[in-house]
Image: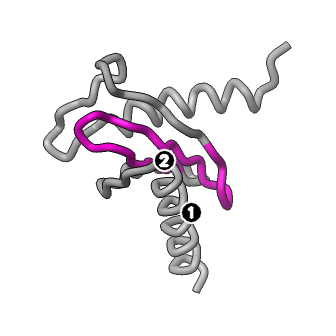
Amino acid sequence: MVSKTVIVGILLMNSILRTVMMQPNHEVNNPFEPGFRLEEVLIYCGVMTLVFYTNSKCYQFGVVAEDGSVERREEIYYTAGGAREAAKNWIALKNFENNG
């Protein structure tokens, strides 16, 4: 039996991947194109984070907050670790702004 948490997580990941793919000019990165890879999915301070790679933009991250809002960051990083650390810093800053 699959737990409710796993099902919700899968549904969220599907939603996140669709949202994370959206470019500001409304072009969509095709997750099946050569060069696209989902590198990491992590939860940090209650925020789900996806680190992904594309040939054209190296590593980037997108986040899903506890309230379900999704934000894709446009900054480019040259390593998955760099994108992960930037995501953690961004989340910590947002939490400080919201609680401070």
Mark 1 residue element: helix
Could you say which is closer to the camera, residue 55 or residue 12? 55
Q: Is residue 97 above or below residue 51?
A: below
Is 82 left or right of 43, judged from the image as shown? left
Q: Which residue is mark 1?
A: 88
Q: Type of residue at label 1? A: Lys
Give the spatial CA distance, label 1 vs label 2.
12 Å
Q: Which secondary structure type mostly characterizes the magenta part of the structure?
A: strand
Q: Type of residue at label 2? A: Ala
Q: Residue furthest bottom?
A: 100
- Residue 91, image x, y percentages: 54, 65
- Residue 95, image x, y percentages: 58, 72
Badge 2 local density, few (<14 within 10 Å), some, or many (20+)?
some
Q: Sequence-wise, which precedes: disc 1 or disc 2?
A: 2
Question: Magenta stretch: residue 29 in it?
Answer: no
| Range drawn in magenta | 42-64
